Image (cartoon, grey):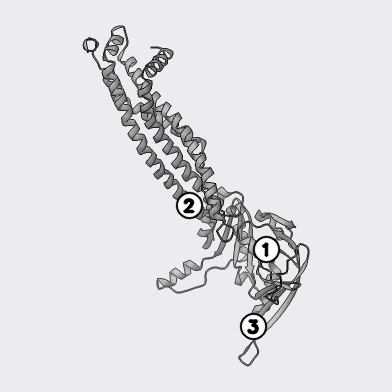
Amino acid sequence: MKPRELISLILLNLNRRKGRVLLTAIGVVIGTAAVVVLVSLAQGLKQNASAQFGNIAEMSQISVYPDWEAQMMIEAEGGEYTSPPPITPDVVEEIGAIPLVKAAIPRTGVYAMTILKTGKLEAWANVIGIGTDDLSVLGLEMASGTYELTKGTVIIGEEVLKNFYDPNQRAEQEPLALSDLQDQHMTLELTKWSEDGSGNYIEVKKALKLRVAGIIRASRSEWDYSVYMPLNEVLEINAWVNGRRFDPKKDGYEMVTVVAEDRESVLNIASQINDMGFMAYTPQEFIQGVNSFFVVLQVIFGGVGGIALLVAAIGIANTMTMAILERTREIGLMKAVGATNQDVLSIFLGESASIGFIGGIGGVLLGLLLGELINIFGSVYMAGQNSGMMGGGSATLSVATPPWLILFALAFSTLIGLISGVYPAVQAASLVPVQALKNE
């Protein structure tokens, strides 16, 4: 039997029993729609979770610290405690030489208490010395100003501007508004405590005049709340605080920010740094765990929809079995005029697969429709929830249907129909023509 004849005969047989085919296909529609909606919901939750991780540039960065954790474990096991290897300039150079490392930038915080002052306003500041004169290598976006960091200048995170207040403001006064600090001068007030020789500690202050060279656009990351100075200037401040100069070969830096060429190489670079005896942390490790969780969630959700498809498969098998009983004489006549067992088998398998395919199309369309409804009502509901959240939260509830899911749902529903029709098709193909023609 030619393929065109086979297809025509399958469509003719399905058209003769439209009601029964429709009712059977409804089960496939429900099961397929369940798979599409539930897996799409898990995919949407995964995308929304990934969107909450802040600045995408941080996904290609690695924070490297001395491995204090390993030393603590050695001590806990009864071993002798020793300081972990410091992050010296030679270590920074070695890390920078790892393949696919774009930059290795040493960082050190200020050891004194720091207050930023401009006019009548002041704010607590997290001041960090960073070993690069061009912050563009970090993939940051500037709200204003330049990426260039030179002596006597600072680059500040946008959220720092919101922390300024007037310490002398009275309750009845309106808060003073902070004007744009771009290219403005402000004072960094440093405070340390020194022994006066008689066992008492006195407060010692020092003030630095600094110019704001740039403001980093807020990205829900560490960069938003910090003030960045050239590393050498911060080391000079720490020398004033400690009463001795910093020796990078002996003391080492607090940490190193490593920038990878691409996100795909981050975990491999972090593993190599860990093998060097240092502790490397990257947000990619956390995201990898989150992605693994959502993969499991997609499998579970897909399994729930698969149960509905299994029930539909039983319905297809029942429909095709009943069709054999009703069409026994027809099958006998087909064999009497030359149809082979292979032809009969192909017809019944084609009919059952077609029912699965028709149900799959309906299920995909229904699933996409339900997904859009969830997006509409979910966004309205979550907008109301977010309005009551502190800190400007932006949680969302939505579904995301990838193209592969649509193709998978159609292929799987068709396969379910095909498998469901195997037993009835084999029964039909094995009928003896003479006995089939005698059937009433």
Identity of the residue drawn at 51% across and 52% down: 287
Give the side of residue 350 with respect to residue 207, left or right: left
Residue 5 can be seen, yes or no: yes
Q: Is residue 243 visible?
A: no
Instruction: Name the amino acid, label 3.
Output: Trp
Image quadrant in which you'd find residue 128: bottom right
Residue farthest to the bottom, as pictured: 198
Local packing at callout 1 (Cα closer than 10 Å; few below 14, some 14-19, many 20+) is many
Badges 1 and 2: C-beta atoms under 8 Å apart? no
**Left/right of residue 312 with respect to residue 120 in the rendered view:** left
Quarter of the image with the C terminus is: top left
Residue assigned mark 3: 193
Amino acid at the residue labelled 2: Val
On residue 290, the disc is 2
Depth check, mark 1 against mark 3: the one in front is 3
Name the residue at 55% across, 64% down: 65
The outermost residue toward the front is 172
Label 3: few (<14), some (14–19) or many (≥20) C-alpha neighbours in 10 Å: some
Residue under the image location 66 percent in, 78 percent down: 241
Mark 1 or 2, which is nearer the eye? 2
Which label sits in the foreground, 3 or 2?
Answer: 2
Q: Position of residue 3 (x, y in %)?
A: 42, 15
Along the polypeptide, which appears first: circle 1 or circle 2? 1
Instruction: Say if 243 sits above or below 348 in the image.
Output: below
Q: Of the residues under marks 3 and 2, which one precedes in the sequence?
A: 3
- Give the number of the disc on residue 382: none
Q: Estimate the spatial distance between the alpha carbons at disc 1 and disc 3, rounded to whole Å.
A: 27 Å
